[in-house]
């Protein structure tokens, strides 16, 4: 299967090309084209993956590929890349975030419905092993969760969306449901976000990184009689679980997340 990739400034692009084209974890399914500038960055990425085609815009690849992966750091760019392919019936994985506004996110989902194409979007953190352990921790009568991680409200990549999506999407997995109204408090370099989802109190602690580093991802689940707390570790292969989720979409045509689940973290971050 032939896949195009747009948004090559993201380090996830390197990982995706490595796993599909170099390690060939999906056999003949590989990245065959990059969309973006024909610059040193993309030339190196193409050489690493044996990719022979670089085009200025993703639209030029319509009709030439079987799927599209969108990995731009700025979610505000995702709609323009995803919608034409979805309307043409081509499956798309929009690597976090789905969009940088609810309106853009809804437009992407509407395009998928119009074209009868599979679309999915999520944070890589949602699928890593530590997230699986927390999601299957067996806490009865869950009362509250707190998810902590790095995010910069002043990021050039649509502010809080760029890294805040990791915490918001993980929270949606741990406490699924329609998010209620959001309360936001900022103290120092931390933005605290509180809302309810599925009757569970959710708190996101989004901490601005420094030049020296950033706070690790962490989550705590509180039940009536039990508490579970753990760092969410990202190893060198942390992109692989999410990549495999998309490969299953291509194989089966079935989406792992419904529209409401993909929209929920976007509506939370938009309110933030």
Image: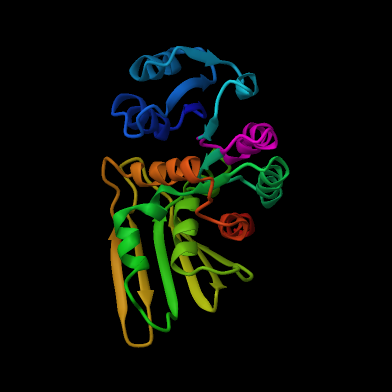
In the image, what residue occupies the spot 42% across and 72% down?
145
Q: How is the image coloured?
A: rainbow
Residue 168, horizontal then vertical, whole percent: 49, 58
Q: How many marks?
A: 0
Residue 21, horizontal then vertical, whole percent: 35, 25
146 relative to 176 in the view: left or right: left
Any magenta on residue 89? yes
Residue 81, horizontal then vertical, whole percent: 63, 32
Viewer-proximal residue, 28 or 15?
28
In this picture, is 235 found above or below 226? above
Q: Quadrant of residue 15?
A: top left
**What stretch of residues is rendered in magenta?**
71-91
In the image, what residue occupies the spot 57% across and 38% down?
91
In this picture, is 140 found above or below 18? below
Q: Residue furthest front?
A: 252
Q: Quadrant of residue 94?
A: top right
Viewer-proximal residue, 235 or 258?
258
In this picture, is 97 found above or below 219? above
Quadrant of the image for the C terminus? bottom right
In the image, what residue occupies the spot 43% across and 50% down?
208
Any magenta on residue 270? no
Main SS category, magenta section:
helix
Residue 271, horizontal then vertical, whole percent: 63, 59
123 relative to 58 in the view: left or right: left
């Amino acid at each position: 299967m032939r896949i195009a990739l747009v948004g090559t400034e993201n380090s996830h692009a390197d990982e995706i090309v490595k796993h599909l084209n170099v390690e060939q974890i999906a056999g003949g399914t590989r990245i065959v084209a990059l969309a973006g500038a024909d610059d040193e960055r993309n030339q190196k990425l193409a050489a690493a993956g044996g990719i022979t085609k670089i085009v200025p815009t993703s639209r030029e690849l319509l009709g030439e590929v079987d799927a599209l992966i969108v990995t731009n750091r700025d979610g505000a760019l995702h709609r323009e890349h995803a919608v034409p392919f979805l309307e043409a019936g081509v499956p798309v994985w929009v690597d976090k975030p789905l969009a940088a506004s609810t309106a853009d996110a809804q437009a992407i989902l509407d395009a998928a419905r119009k074209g009868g194409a599979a679309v999915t979007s999520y944070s890589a953190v949602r699928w890593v092993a530590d997230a699986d352990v927390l999601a299957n921790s067996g806490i009865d009568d869950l009362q509250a969760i707190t998810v902590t991680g790095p995010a910069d409200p002043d990021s050039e990549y649509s502010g809080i969306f760029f890294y805040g999506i990791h915490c918001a999407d993980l929270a949606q997995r741990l406490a699924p449901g329609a998010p209620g109204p959001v309360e936001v408090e900022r103290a120092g370099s931390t933005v605290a976000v509180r809302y309810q989802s599925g009757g569970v109190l959710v708190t996101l602690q989004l901490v601005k990184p420094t030049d020296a580093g950033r706070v690790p991802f962490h989550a705590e689940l509180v039940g009536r009689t039990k508490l579970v707390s753990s760092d969410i570790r990202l190893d060198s292969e942390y992109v692989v679980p999410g990549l495999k989720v998309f490969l299953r979409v291509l194989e089966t045509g079935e989406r792992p997340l419904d529209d409401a689940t993909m929209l929920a973290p976007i509506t939370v971050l938009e309110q933030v």
